[in-house]
Image (cartoon, rainbow, N blue to C red):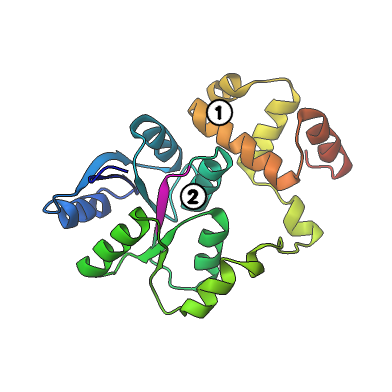
Amino acid sequence: MSDIIRVVLADDHVFVRDGIKSLLENEANIEVVGEAIDGADALDVVDAHKPDLLIVDIRMPNLTGIEVVEKLRSDSNNVKIIMLSMHESEEYVLKSIKAGADGYLLKGSSKDEFLKALHTVANGGKYFSGDISSILISQLTTSSLSAEPKQNFGEEMMITKREKEILTLLLSGKGNKEIAEALDISKRTAEVHRFNLMKKLKVKNLMELSNKAAEYSLL
């Protein structure tokens, strides 16, 4: 990484992005190279600018921050990532760590803490703000994260309305471009919805997807 930390900001609220930029504008070694207005846009902006660090809101339209992190990690993208959130609960921190985030920062953090988190993560460390102990963080990032949480049948097979639309189009032979056109979304968003659907249903190809849909009457 060069001496300049190249940052992409992803948040659907302009005032949040502007606020972060105002915090960073006088930092000589930090440059905001791109901004994203939603989750799908974040993937495109990261792909275009190849930043050192992505600061992403945990709750956004067209893919949540968690889904963005999962997709980047599944693509073997090693960009450093700080999850930005209003929520201090351990549940959100755990989900962020499991997805592959390097840091978790509360939106109400001070400028000093924000800069500390940014530099820590950009230099290969981990940073988690909020009322959570270093011991718990250590546990979460090692053995306790190695096992998948158990889900019951109802949770595991529950798909959203949009995922059902994606499933219907996939099983009718549509590709990502055709799905994007049919649902009036970007091709990248269609790709990510497809990825998330197949991950949720634990299938690797369309044949397995078709069998799972029939077995559990998903349509």
**Helix, strand, or loop for circle 2?**
loop
**Helix, strand, or loop for circle 1?**
helix
**Taking 154 as reference, is 189 left or right?**
left
Using the image, determine if residue 3 lies above or below residue 180.
Answer: below
At a point 70% along the width and 34% down the height, the residue shown is: 167
Q: Position of residue 2 (x, y in %)?
A: 27, 42
Q: Specify the quadrant that holds the C terminus.
A: top right
Task: Name the residue tied to disc 2.
Answer: 64
At label 1, counting other C-alpha atoms closer than 10 Å, the crowd grade (few under 14, some 14-19, many 20 or more) is few
Using the image, determine if residue 47 lies above or below residue 127.
Answer: above
Q: Position of residue 109 (x, y in %)?
A: 28, 69
At label 2, counting other C-alpha atoms closer than 10 Å, the crowd grade (few under 14, some 14-19, many 20 or more) is some
At a point 56% along the width and 31% down the height, the residue shown is: 190
Q: Tell me which segment is drawn in magenta.
A: 78-83
Task: Name the residue tied to disc 1.
Answer: 183
Magenta: main secondary structure: strand
- Residues at circles 2 and 1 in contact by the CB criterion of under 8 Å: no
